[in-house]
Amino acid sequence: MNRKKSIETINSYDGYWDILVIGGGATGLGCALDAASRGYKTLLVEQHDFAKGTSSRSTKLVHGGVRYLQQGNISLVLEALHERGLLMQNAPHLVQNQAFIVPNYEWWDGPFYGVGLKVYDLLAGRLGLGPSKWLSKAETLKRIPTLEPDQLRGGVIYYDGQFDDARLAVNLAQSIEDAGGVPINYMQVTGLTYSGKMIDGVKLKDTIDGGEREVHARVVINATGIFTDDILRMDQPTATPIISHSQGVHLVLDKRFLKGSTAIMVPQTEDGRVLFAVPWHDRVLVGTTDTPVDRASLEPRPLEEEIAFILKHAAQYMVEDPTRADILSVFAGLRPLVGEGEGKKTATISRDHHLAVSQSGLVTITGGKWTTYRKMAEDTVNQAALIAGLPESECRTRKLRIHGWLKNMDPEDPLCAYGSDAVFIRRIIESDPGMGEKLHDHLPYVKAEVVWAVRHEMALTLEDVLARRTRSLILDASASMDIAGASADLMAKELGLGSQWQQQQVSEFKQLAGGYLPDCCG
């Protein structure tokens, strides 16, 4: 995947793209892959980097949604469980089976959640990951030795999926290119173009070199997540906003707080959220919150009360109470929730997706969640193809192997997330053993991964590499700042850029990373 090649393709093509997708998050990437795999000439443009926003800031779960079952949204749970199964088949190098325990501290918890999770098993059908069952106190503590034992009666174990969201986004962008489509990052839509009253393209600005251009398409898909309303207002300045922004915060802790490989799921906190403590990349991810916010931002900041809320609830379930000093990184993401959310807690707004077509032919898809991205894309491309009058073509993504597909990789392999591409990274190391050196003792990444990200994953900035191609910033914000200089040096050599670029990148990244430290918040 090469940005220069994408630019050349865009500049050399004077005709109409069949489908143009705005937005390089989960939904936009899914739409572009669906369209390209059907044989439609497809272009995807993203204003920043792939999965810069919401799609790299999730709880890292591919799940049916136990909470949605509790709310009675059976159709969403059924769809999500089916899509969970398909994603595990289509990206086995990124999606793994994860065991969860619902700890029971009240006598009625066991029967209540046990029955509910049996329904969850039943809805999953043949795509289920394993049967839920009741565990005794001893069995529960054997699986999670650091769980608070006082008044613990036992637990209910069940199974869901876990993944690396940003890595999946990169693989989806690569899959689009594999299918004949053109994905490009750092390409901002500044306006829409029209033929009569119908949208026939977009105005673009390359935020890397400042270049501007127009491209035309038979149909344009608005898949911009938290920025959905901005594109709608480009089409219709008086458009009524449809998005309610909800902030979710996660804390990253050392593995000692959750020994073993089993996650904790607390079905009901005092604000109505599910709380997770999940082992991930040899760390513990704890979250999340549900805080209404007024506006969209590419870099939302956690609030002090959100951090306090998570620490308070984590302490109720962990033997060692985590403190602010134990937080390795804290990150926030905004959910683009749709529909009649006014006056309602954001935790109660539906996570169903929303598909609409404006009078000018703009197709808008928003809402939903990572687990159902493929189905959202299928529905959207079906509608977009109809609007554009494209030849009928069946969806191919149900069984489409995502770039990097490789079964039975060792989850302990530090290059596991690269799937079939891992062999090429190892070749970089074989040709230069120094490329096998770790970037930092507290992080699992080696120099060759920086080189690979620049050469083949369209990484253009230090943030791209340390936040999303690797997850250094998420796993340990302080350590990521320590390796900024060395990583920028590797990137500059690959990109043919000088010391001034390096210094600017290091400065910008350290300013960004400072916002992931626990003392950043207010």
Image (cartoon, helix red, strand yellow):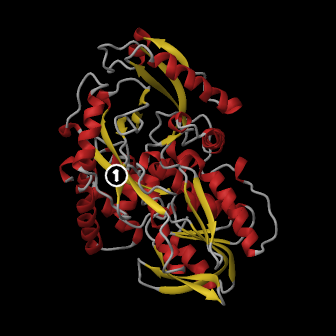
Q: In this view, does 236 lie above or below 121?
A: below
In the picture, measured across the screen, residue 280 lies left or right of residue 224, that is left
Number of numbered callouts drawn? 1
Q: Nearer the viewer, residue 83 or 461?
A: 83
Tell me if residue 451 comes above or below residue 417 in the rendering: below
Amino acid at the residue labelled 1? Ala
Q: Residue 362's spot in the image, x, y percent?
A: 62, 74
Where's the C terminus, which quadrant? bottom left
Q: Residue at x 64, y 60 (%)?
A: 33
User: Residue drawn at (64%, 80%), measured in percent from left and top?
Assistant: 360
Q: In this view, does 197 lie to the left or right of 171?
A: right
Q: What element carries label 1?
A: strand
Tell me the residue at 69%/30% (across/down): 125
Left or right: where does residue 377 sit relative to residue 142?
right
Residue 171, image quadrant: bottom right
Percent of width and height locating residue 134: 51, 15
Where in the figure is residue 81, as x and y percent of width and height?
62, 38
Q: Which of the 4 quarters of the picture holds residue 48?
A: bottom left
Q: Name the residue rendered at 59%, 40% in the picture.
A: 73
User: Can you say whether 173 is above or below 151 in the image?
Assistant: below
Which quadrant: the N terminus? bottom right
The residue under label 1 is: 332
In x, y percent, where is residue 124? 65, 32
